[in-house]
Image (cartoon, rainbow, N blue to C red):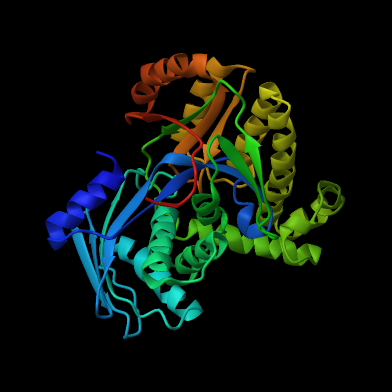
Amino acid sequence: MTPQQQAQKVFIDQFEYQPQVLVYAPGRVNVIGEHTDYNDGFVMPCAIDYGTAISGAKREDSIFRVYAADLQQWDEFDLSQPIKPHFDAAGDYKWTGYVRGVVKYIQEKCPHFKTGADLAISGNVPLSSGLSSSAALEVATGKFCQIVGGLDLTQVEIALIGQQAENRFVGCQCGNMDQLISALGQQDHLLKIDCRSLETEAVPVPQGVAVMIVNSNVKHDLVAGEYNSRRQQCEQAAEFFGVKALRDVSIAQFKQHEAELTALDPIVAKRARHVITENQRVLDAVVALKQGDLQQLGVLMGQSHVSMKDDFEITVPEVDYLVELAQQVIGDSGGARMTGGGFGGCIVALAPQEKIEAVRKNIAEHYEKHTGLKETFYVCHASAGVSVL
């Protein structure tokens, strides 16, 4: 059953009447450009064919009743009262922060929004995998509110409200990439996003090329400190260079002052080196894809992974091993790298479709034996962004 079908069925089961609205927002995989978004830089993700559906209906009062089908958990809050977080000590109700946060910041932007609603949520984005289950939930919630409230919001505004919820309500200082691609994704295309100007450029996935995602099943939780500390280190580096964000520093400028920054703070220097070189890799990857040059794309993805491992220090041994196993099979006909915030989660690989089974087989034969964990293997298609069904 798809998330869309599941959300509708669960709505009828739980609320005992017919829903009026069905929205769906996809998760995403980032092909290249990691931790560059909150540095005002460039990223190149695609929306994937896994996502979150919300089935629901408007109420006559100001109460929001929300049922998360996959967790079998309820939340309820009142739009006429200040919206506050609702977590339990174990973090079991963390999902409620994404819904409440989006509704809260929609109200700030559209103060007349007081419409209560009943919602059932269902998704199939693997949780804690780095494929943006949270952004899919935020964007779906924003779109749902836009429809039931008749609100004048663009897709970009919905995405930025989702980011605001994550930054200010949930407490993860992520950039805007995940929400933007969930809102703006295009079928069969990657999307180069300039995270400062919010300009986007659709870059076609070359014919016959597969997007493979392999989950290490090492769970990560970005709210727990590491992500936020990387962001602070990047801000320190920007301050050193006297710029608004590391986006404004060229590779040549970095090299010129690298020794000085390293003497001051070697860790901050490494973080800056990753972001500054990664921005250039995204721009180079756009050119490689347009030329159908999978060999060059593979080189750039490989460099990106090494940079995340050595300079940004966000990979884990299991993820490094997955990249190695994938690359053994792909050779110079594509590439593999860690994707997402880091500290676990997934790798992404782009390669000709005829390589899929050999990559799957090599990983299945070695990964579990070596790590004690069983991988999950997905073949994804670049998909459209949020939609009303």
Q: Nearer the viewer, residue 333 or 120?
A: 120
Q: Position of residue 113 (x, y in %)?
A: 40, 79
The answer to whether residue 80 is above or below residue 333 is below
Confirm whether residue 32 shows in the render. no
102 displayed left or right of 336:
left
229 displayed left or right of 71:
right
Residue 165 picture quarter: bottom left
Q: Position of residue 47 (x, y in %)?
A: 50, 43
The number of numbered badges drawn on the structure is 0
The single residue placed furthest to the bottom in the displayed view is 81
Q: Nearer the viewer, residue 13 or 170?
A: 13
At 35% from the left edge and 70% from the top edge, which residue is drawn? 100
At 46% from the left edge and 64% from the top edge, which residue is drawn? 166
At 77% from the left edge and 64% from the top edge, which residue is drawn? 240
The answer to whether residue 373 is above or below residue 325 is below
374 displayed left or right of 13:
right
59 displayed left or right of 31:
left
Q: Position of residue 263 (x, y in %)?
A: 77, 56
At 74% from the left edge and 37% from the top edge, which residue is drawn? 284
Q: Position of residue 136 (x, y in %)?
A: 42, 53
Confirm whether residue 148 shows in the render. yes
The answer to whether residue 79 is above or below residue 28 is below
Position of the N terminus, as image quadrant, is top left
Q: Nearer the viewer, residue 351 or 143?
A: 143
The answer to whether residue 387 is above or below residue 87 is above
